[in-house]
Amino acid sequence: MIQHMTRASSVTKTTYNLAHDVDKIYSTSFVASRNGPPALPWTGPSDDEPILGAQDEDEEDGLSLAARDFDAYWVKRIARDKSRPIAYSPGNGSHYVKFGRSFLKLRRKGDLSGLGLGNIRLTCLGRDGGVLKRLLTEAQIAYLERDGKQTSIFRNQQSEWVQSTSRPPRDLATIVLADVQKKVIIEDIKEYLHPLTKKWYRDHAIPYRRGYLLSGPPGTGKTSLCFALAGFFQLPLYIASLSSIPDESGLSELFAVLPERSMILLEDVDAAGITDIRAPVGDAASEAARKSAEHRHKEKESRISLSALLNAIDGILSGEGRILLMTTNHVEQLDPALSRPGRIDMTVHFENITTKSAMEYFQTFYSTTATFNTTSESIKKYQARKLSSFDYPETEEEVAQLARIFAKKIPNGEFSPAELQGYLLLHKYRPDKAILGAEQWIKEVRLDRKLKMGPMAATEKSEELVEPVETIEVTPPYEEDVRQRRSTRARSKSVKSRSRRKAV
Ligand SMILES: Nc1ncnc2c1ncn2[C@@H]1O[C@H](COP(=O)(O)OP(=O)(O)OP(=O)(O)O)[C@@H](O)[C@H]1O
């Protein structure tokens, strides 16, 4: 909001950090905080007073030092953490700032305990408010330079959105999901975001909103897909869990202030213990949803009713232009009213890992481009040391060959991608060990599940569990395969050197 006044122009803003833009702040009242974003300390009370702590070292430098000498790196890292930069920001009240040649008055009001800036009112003397507009434009540009490519993530704190972090986008290629499913959802969102679609909705008097339901067992990539989609479309992601919202008016407030072109993720909607059930009495699916909701309501006493949730999603106060994503582990337990078209326009089903997807996952995990993506000599040496006892695949084709051997050992649909990721993380640099240890890992996970199910189930299931793992046999044996790869490599090297000699 920009106000022109007879003698002064002023602007009230709450969104941008002004630290980059103002040249100097003349004030004696500052708030020192270690909570603020360390990269953006405000100018301190005096130019001579150093800002304590330094910026984070360049990531590549840190990695190089760690690769050479982990102990030295760790001492430095801890010292740096202990002297985290202290950010000074103007306290509540009036301050004077110099921006270019102009003096501006800055008045701050609000809660200084959190990360937010509270309410800042800027006033400049004179009739020309242009200096304020310039300041805000520069602040916006500085913000975009710093955070433009990152995915901004907001979480609800009670009934307010608070930016929790910005992080580099997750590549969609790292999500194991059938290519066709990925393509369908991306095309659908593209179509929705198209300006002609918006016009079409308006012309047909249909509320311009789109909803997706992501369903599947735990750890199959529902939340990860939301992060990746937000990164792909460069949209801010707003995440809320129904159980953390204090009451129904809080819920509608959260939906009402969502900006156009944003994504909102409601996690585990089946687990929220919604308090009224609208499924019609009669058919079996609705009955199941009703019973399960009643049961969960008894257990959780959620403060949010189903009608309030439906109202927030598509009521009159709910903003337009946003994309709603809901995740659930039990699609069958959702009230049909929640998932009807108009609220949920597309459902994406996630599954446990299949033999085929295990192969793809292994390939992404050990991709040579991801592992050797560095120009630093010390990091290369470190990797060479780590891999010295093993002939790490040099090409993507070699990784694919190993992936095929690995995938044969993974039974269809028994393990989640999260479980598989946990296992492969134990062998980050050793795809050979991941292959050799797979049967043992499968046995251990099965045993672990049996123990978690309790002694009764354990006895019932014991038959199943002692059965040998069906997919164990690997032909050719792993060692033989490595030998084959080595001899192919040696052959291709000798062909290359022969043709080089010929060329000479
Ligand atoms: N399909 C997948 N592709 C790639 N990584 C995955 C996949 N599924 C799970 N993961 C990995 O497993 C972890 C958990 O995944 P995520 O939180 O997305 O699962 P979820 O389906 O949302 O689980 P929950 O239902 O328990 O919330 C993440 O670290 C993620 O990298």
Image: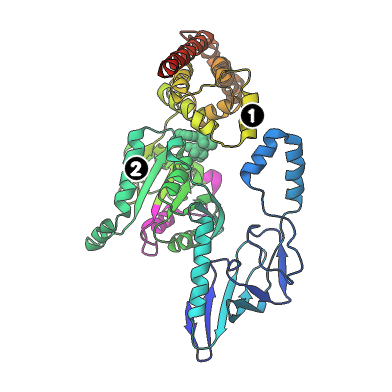
Mark 1 residue's CB less than 8 Å from ligand 1: no
**Looking at the picture, which amino acid does disc 2 mark?**
Ile
Contact, mark 2 vs mark 1 (Cβ under 8 Å)? no
> Residue 314: x and y, percent?
36, 57
- Residue plotted at (41% across, 34% down): 350
Count of marks overlaid on the render: 2
Residue 316 picture quarter: bottom left
Q: Say if the magenta span includes residue 109.
A: no
494 relative to 298, above or below: above
Examine the rendering and report whether any part of residue 472 can be seen.
no
Q: Which residue is mark 1?
A: 381
Q: Is residue 288 left or right of residue 52?
A: left
Q: The magenta stretch spans which residues? A: 298-323
In percent of width and height, residue 299 lies at 55, 43
Residue 460, placed above or below residue 168: above
Task: Judge whether residue 315 is colored magenta.
Answer: yes
Considering only vertical position in the picture, is 115 above or below 185?
A: below
Question: For mark 2, what is the residue?
Answer: 185
Query: Can you say which quadrant of the picture contains the C terminus?
Result: top left
Nearest to N terminus: mark 2 or mark 1: 2
Q: Position of residue 66 (x, y in %)?
A: 69, 37
Q: CA distance from mark 2 to mark 1?
A: 42 Å
Q: Which mark is residue 494?
A: none
The answer to which of 18 and 470 lies nearer the viewer is 18
Look at label 1 and name its amino acid.
Lys
